[in-house]
Amino acid sequence: MMKTFLLPVMAVAAISVAVPAAAQHYGPPRGGPAYGQQHAGPPMAVRVRHLERNLAFAHRARVMSTSKARDFQRGIDRLVHLERQYGPRMTLRERHDLERRYQDLDRSIDRYVQRARYRR
């Protein structure tokens, strides 16, 4: 008799503990960055590799002069330097500034990449 009574009580107790824990959300909030994170985009190192890869592609395709490629490389280097200067705890304003500069440089290089692809 005691076993038949104890088994359902233990099952109810286990379920009442497990259900609230399973309902909690432990990840970043939906629709926005995690706490303390000011952006949700890829890390700057990934973006810099993207810029350098596109720069090399356009230069190899001969739609960009060597001097223009050097100018763009200096722009990439300035972007990396600026990110280091801002540091890991950059403000939202600094993050937006860095993002705008990255996008401007990416658009400029992308014009040459599009020309290179058009020529193929």
Image: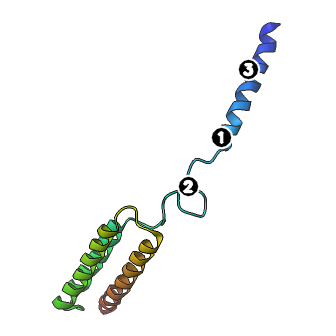
On screen, 73 above or below 14?
below
Q: Tell me the residue at 19%/85% (across/down).
A: 70
Q: Tell me the residue at 32%/92% (across/down).
A: 115
If you read the primary sequence from the N terminus, does the residue marked by circle 2 or circle 1 appear first?
1
- Give the colour scheme of this rendering: rainbow
Q: Amino acid at mark 1?
A: Ala
Q: Which mark is residue 22?
A: 1
On screen, 36 above or below 84?
above
If you read the primary sequence from the N terminus, does the residue marked by circle 1 or circle 3 appear first?
3
Q: Which mark is residue 28?
A: 2
Residue 17 sits in quarter: top right
- For label 3, the residue is 10
Q: Disc 3 on helix, strand or loop?
A: helix
Compared across the picture, whether 86 is left or right of 32 comes to left
Distance, label 3 to label 2, CA atoms, is: 34 Å
Expressed as whole percent of the image width and height from the top left, the position of residue 56 reads 23, 79
Q: Residue furthest top?
A: 1
